[in-house]
Amino acid sequence: MKHILSLVFIFVISLSAFAQKTIQGFTEESAKAEIALEEKFDSYLKASNLDQWMKKLTARPHHLGSKMGKEYAEWMRDQFRSWGYDAEVETYKVLFPTPKVRVLEMVAPSKYTAKLVEPALKEDATSGQAKEQLPTYHGFSADGDVTGELVFVGYGVPSDYEELDKLGIDVKGKIVIAKYGGSWRGIKPKVAQEKGAIGCIIYSDPEDDGYYQGDVYPKGPYRPALGAQRGSVLDLPVRPGDPLTPNIGATEEAKRIERAQADNLIKIPVIPIGYEDATPLLKALGGPLAPEYMRGALPLTYHVGPGPVKVHLNLQFDWKLVDCHNVIAKMKGSELPDEWVMRGNHHDAWVNGAADPISGMVALMEEARAVAELTKTGWKPKRTIIYAGWDGEEPGLIGSTEWAEHHAKELQQKLVAYINSDGNGRGFLYAQGSHTLQQMVSDVARDVTDPQTGVSVLERRKSAMAAYTSSAKAKKEIINSSSMTIDALGSGSDYSPFIQHLGIPALNIGFGGEDGGGEYHSIYDSYDMYKRFKDGTFEYGVTLAKTAGRTTLRLANSNILPFDFKGFYNTVNGYVKEVTTLTDNMRESTEVENQMIRENRYKLASDPKDTFIQPKANEPVPYLNFSNLLNAMASLEKSANTYAELVKMNPNPNTNLARLNKLLYTAEQKLTIADGLPRRPWFQHSIYAPGYYTGYGVKTLPGVREAIEQRNWKEAQEQIEILASNLTKYSSQIDEAASILKMR
Amino acid sequence: MKHILSLVFIFVISLSAFAQKTIQGFTEESAKAEIALEEKFDSYLKASNLDQWMKKLTARPHHLGSKMGKEYAEWMRDQFRSWGYDAEVETYKVLFPTPKVRVLEMVAPSKYTAKLVEPALKEDATSGQAKEQLPTYHGFSADGDVTGELVFVGYGVPSDYEELDKLGIDVKGKIVIAKYGGSWRGIKPKVAQEKGAIGCIIYSDPEDDGYYQGDVYPKGPYRPALGAQRGSVLDLPVRPGDPLTPNIGATEEAKRIERAQADNLIKIPVIPIGYEDATPLLKALGGPLAPEYMRGALPLTYHVGPGPVKVHLNLQFDWKLVDCHNVIAKMKGSELPDEWVMRGNHHDAWVNGAADPISGMVALMEEARAVAELTKTGWKPKRTIIYAGWDGEEPGLIGSTEWAEHHAKELQQKLVAYINSDGNGRGFLYAQGSHTLQQMVSDVARDVTDPQTGVSVLERRKSAMAAYTSSAKAKKEIINSSSMTIDALGSGSDYSPFIQHLGIPALNIGFGGEDGGGEYHSIYDSYDMYKRFKDGTFEYGVTLAKTAGRTTLRLANSNILPFDFKGFYNTVNGYVKEVTTLTDNMRESTEVENQMIRENRYKLASDPKDTFIQPKANEPVPYLNFSNLLNAMASLEKSANTYAELVKMNPNPNTNLARLNKLLYTAEQKLTIADGLPRRPWFQHSIYAPGYYTGYGVKTLPGVREAIEQRNWKEAQEQIEILASNLTKYSSQIDEAASILKMR
């Protein structure tokens, strides 16, 4: 241990030599005050609070609609109030089905009835609370009582069905079984339904989060044989939130649509199971050998079927409206009360939810407590700070979406940025979000120390990124850069309504990478598990509070908001290059594939003893007209450079900062599309969206990229024009901001 | 079936349009005669002969030194004689240890005694011949009775030990357990011994050839739970052949060295086991989690140890000399009896050996029978044709090596080329060998029809190569080329003494890719298995006879031997580019890795809760002087082009063809190094060798490449000069050949 510390010490010294303490958005003077404030803030943070609060908030199951969910929300509200916040519980009425009947059985070639129960463990104190636990099920599965032959579809994403097509396997009228992983779970029943399947089973293969990855619970943190991953299968890439109140807040009196009219409900029954329940089904499957990439770590030969396995699946739900309790705590800004900075984390869990979401929730609370503590020293934030604890995130980002839809107009006027966290673990900083905020995140990461190694979380992240990159060139670039890149936002947590529906700049941050396990959405995501295998000392909970707290404080206190349009330009320019290269590559590969098909090459490469259906040729890829987009990017580059030059200088005392700042934080709204993306109008951002067929995974420039990927050339051209037009409007707003800075 | 045939028909028509029937080495006229001859040859080939002979030759176990091995050799000799060959059994006396004691047991933390027996199956008629079967063991394992803690080392190749070093795991004084695969088996105990291990266990993980790959025997062809892979662990990359008679034939009276003096014997005990015997050991292992890439498909969490598992391994052998019976059958050339073309396949097996080697042996016999049949029509080969059935291939290419060493001088004078085959299966043509023969192999492949699809084996191979390549550019290149590339020869079958020791042009050919299974070197490699899961109709056996037969006939009949020096130049030029790029890439990566290490990056990227030992920095990579090599390549290009231009024209009737041909087929000897490669003088070829640390896997430009890989810069420079000098001598010989063609 000593040896390690001394090595680290040398390293810290050498790094501090080139650390610069400039902070974007602050003058040299105000930066000094800000740094002093942040150091004081750090000194208030106590790991023991996180531990104590997690123990309380995970003591019993607290899903959406539960008694404990309400109690915990009210307790949190009271905590915020006790620290001086103006805190309320805002309640919505939302659809939340829970199971009445769950039957899964193999009826041929032999009989097996799935257990569908995660056993309690004596090593886990809360695992036996069966009466309050939601059983293993998928939120928003359809009701259904179906019997059919079984087909194994790998991860069950579109490319898997292309492979099955080649084997001559059709899932029409069949029940599919898919592995968890490879995409967000909701994609699996969605694609299965599109392909004509009548039911869907999703199991956790031990390769992905079971014994293949590490020792299983309680010996290690990985998923045991009957551990099953609950989760929502609401069609999130179409629309999150309450299915019955699209685009409006689900208040008591809101006008609701019929369930049959909802655009984000799956129509087939779907259920999650553990691999102990999956094994007899997979073992008895016949038909062709599954392609190698589809197989998992079970001790059997993976066949795809269909049959001889026949499965009976009967799922019936109670489709009731329940109360969804968001906790909203405000601290009014002293100078700019109508400019808001918002931090959020959800509080509802599938079961006890220690890692997901309480680890993040308690870090947010401690951050809020320390910010309140600062006000006792006489400091007040310039802008209003709002802390939120969302309910109903698990079934489909429901609490945050309803709140954002309900307050949409005001938020688009006032909200500077939304900073999200969710479950938090041990390891490395990750950050995703609007690329105008990338430089600010880098600055924050530079200023927060990693608790295990003593270097900054920036340097630790860079080290990990470099270590896990194989290219020498990429390694060099990473370690020689003084900043970090942030990823784009897809979906999967409460930032979605803010950035993707309202066009409000957003971030999602947290720590992880050294807290692997298989407890996700199971009864084993408990306080006992968290203490033993996750961030048991809560030092990364405190580090998250430091990181998110700095982000919040800097946004709340800055003179000129730290938006970096050059960084944004560079990133988007990379995306534009990707989509142009994508079409060029598709053109070349389509030509070659068509020749392969014409010359019967794939058939000749296949084993004549097996069925092989040669894929169909595609129409040649046309040349798209990217000129408007490229011209818009050229303008954006110019606008971003001009603004960056001007903002470097101290502003004229007469500068209209209020006007300037509003232009800055509302600029991202120029990137929204009023009618939304094709086939999913709720998603309005033209730069970032979850993939229609990937779920959580982001698609950047989604309208353009997905049209190209789907070979819809007409739509691709339309989306190019929309994107170009949005980027032009965005540039104009930056120009307007620059013109304010120019007035002297 | 009809549908497929009609598709194929259309395709054949379209291909025949661009098929050209020129044959390298023949005039237009003589090519016509050759084609007619080959068609007649084809018409003699009978699949039923292969079936009948395989049934006979696999009826009982016939390993080196066995009663049946001798009987079968004599029967084959008699067959050759009956067809008109001058056939003999040439016998050597060679070292061949067989087990007296085999004990493997876990002694802690609990007791388990490994079964070490493959069970007989009622579905497999020969699997119960326990009395005659060699037990599961490794040929040339050391004697040893050791007890030690167990360490799991993945595939047990050098890079695995680098990973273990990072985890702080040392195998000194320990027993290692490695998975089969990732390299030739003999590398595993060799590296383990270098690292200080006292024993080695190699098991067949089901991921590699068991249930993960397909249904296990007898349901499917994959390896069952107790199936174990016998095999040699003689240090083949140092020297194959009888350990006691390096460089000379192991005749009765040969002078033998002491066993302790042999340079190719491993010094630790090593044993192969099935995964049923491996599971209790791996399950009980503690220590760090194995890196993900090391894990397999057993239903357990792979840990590396060491301990708490302790293992006792006791292996004792009978180190006896046995008779090694090569069958040699000659047909004298009518015009050039002192120019020989040789075809060979081994006949010894580890047990019954239907796939390995009898499938290839019976194809060779049928080829020889049909060639003999041709002589009844009045035709005689210009050059002498020799067919060989080698003994002792399995324990270490012993029969072929002793014969080649014994007849070395004559072979270097007379042998034009050696064409090898080994086990043969269903699917696609593969070919490896001297690149001067690449174009000839392409021409042959163009002229042989694939029995399952009706296209040429060339087009079928191209289709498979293209289908399994992901790059559109590479696909395009493959399908638009009218020829195929052949791979370089490493080791693993009887071509090794010819090409790598004597510098004689060689080829290794066969069919496979649709005959996967896990019977390799087990009692389940039987006639029953072959009929059900391999080339059960023997149509690919006949296709091998057609392919190898054409190769033999063209070499035997050509006016000017079909050596293509331009093709050779192009391939070697690719290798030269690889080694220069390799040093450049190593220079860049070493610089970055050293920075990563200096800045403690890997340590910072690792989990502080785990042991992580940062690797050591390497010295910077110097610039090597490649100028002599590049100049030699420039000369070679010129010489090859000049020769190619001249040989295109019909030769002057006065051309000294005998002198010309001898220059052509002895040119490859100019590429040999009299003192051999560093640390392995038996290997003399400067272009092709098995990798010192890969075994079967080839290293091209081995002296240069391995010195660079091992960062031995002084040796790399020396080897560059040797290679340059060899290539210069080679060019001179081509120039000499060209000058003969120039005489008019």
Image (cartoon, coloured by chain):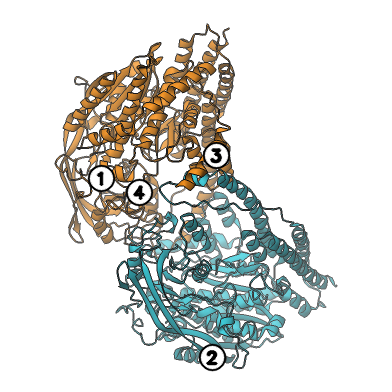
Chain colours: A orange, B cyan
Mark 2–mark 3 distance (CA, rounded to whole Å): 68 Å
**Mark 1 packing: few (<14 Cα in 10 Å), some, or many (20+)?**
many
- Mark 4 or 1: the one toward you: 1
Rendered image: mark on residue A155:
4
Secondary element under disc 2, as helix, strand or loop, is helix
- Marks 1 and 3 belong to one chain: yes
- Marks 3 and 4 belong to one chain: yes
Which residue is identified by label 1? A524
Hey, what amino acid is under mark 1? Answer: Tyr
Secondary element under disc 1, as helix, strand or loop, is loop
Residue A523: image location, x then y, percent: 23, 44
Residue A546: image location, x then y, percent: 40, 29
Earlier sequence position, callout 3 versus callout 4: 4
Secondary element under disc 4, as helix, strand or loop, is loop
Hey, what amino acid is under mark 3? Answer: Ile
Chain letter for the residue marked with disc 1 in the picture: A
Depth check, front residue: A586 or B588: B588
Name the quadrant containing residue B118: bottom left
Which residue is identified by label 2? B77
Chain letter for the residue marked with disc 3 in the picture: A
- Mark 4 or 2: the one toward you: 4
Mark 4–mark 1 distance (CA, rounded to whole Å): 24 Å
Residue B225 can be seen, yes or no: no
Q: Is residue B466 above or below residue B342?
A: above
Rendered image: mark on residue A478:
3
Mark 1–mark 3 distance (CA, rounded to whole Å): 37 Å
Residue B119: image location, x then y, percent: 32, 78
Mark 4–mark 2 distance (CA, rounded to whole Å): 57 Å
Mark 3–mark 4 distance (CA, rounded to whole Å): 32 Å
Mark 2–mark 1 distance (CA, rounded to whole Å): 71 Å
